[in-house]
């Protein structure tokens, strides 16, 4: 069975600020940016054939703390990314906690754009 999710988009009011935030907390060197005639996208790094997503700025994209929550892969230990959230301009709203030994750990943050997202890792 294929993944239930094929693609995701995270709204951004300021695409450069959002790119800086995610590059800082996850240690990305950069995110490829493109303009699609009316909206901007910055792509999260992904291996060929894997699930991907992007930051998106445009009139139809509104940052939100309600609705669907995306869990970003923060393996091997989400503590590394979480330790950079506040200095990068975000907010921790649920500190690292165990889900179960089998499913690992999670934390919930607000990014610089006002989106509620989660971090997940096995440790």
Image (cartoon, rainbow, N blue to C red):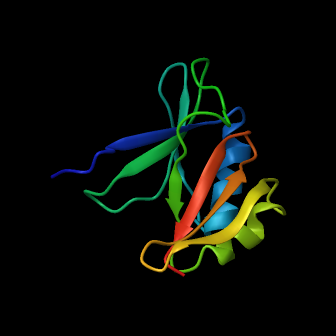
Point 82% across, 54% down: residue: 89
Point 68% across, 37% down: residue: 65
Point 33% across, 45% down: residue: 5
Q: Single out the residue that lies furthest toward the left.
A: 1
Horizontal relation, residue 107 to residue 55: left or right: right
- Of residue 51 and residue 15, the one placed in the foreground of this image is 51
Q: Where is 79 relative to 34, above or below?
A: below
- Of residue 54 and residue 69, the one placed in the foreground of this image is 69
Which of the image's four quarters has the C terminus? bottom right
Q: Position of residue 79 (x, y in %)?
A: 67, 76
**Is residue 74 visible in the rendered structure shown here?**
no
- Of residue 68 and residue 62, the one placed in the foreground of this image is 68
Q: Where is 88 relative to 3, above or below?
A: below
Q: Quadrant of residue 83?
A: bottom right
**Is residue 5 visible in the rendered structure shown here?**
yes
Q: Position of residue 14 (x, y in %)?
A: 72, 36
Q: Position of residue 102 (x, y in %)?
A: 42, 77
Horizontal relation, residue 37 to residue 115: left or right: left
Q: Position of residue 91 (x, y in %)?
A: 80, 54
């Amino acid at each position: 069975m294929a993944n239930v999710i094929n693609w995701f988009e995270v709204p951004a009011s300021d695409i450069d600020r959002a790119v800086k935030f995610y590059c800082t907390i996850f240690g990305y060197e950069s995110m490829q940016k493109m303009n699609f005639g009316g909206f901007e996208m910055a792509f999260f790094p992904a291996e060929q054939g894997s699930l991907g997503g992007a930051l998106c700025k445009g009139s139809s994209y509104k940052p939100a703390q309600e609705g669907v929550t995306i869990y970003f892969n923060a393996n091997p230990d989400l503590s590394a990314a979480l330790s950079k959230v506040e200095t990068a301009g975000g907010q921790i709203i649920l500190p690292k906690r165990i889900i179960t030994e089998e499913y690992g750990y999670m934390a919930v943050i607000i990014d610089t754009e006002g989106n509620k997202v989660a971090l997940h890792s096995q440790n």
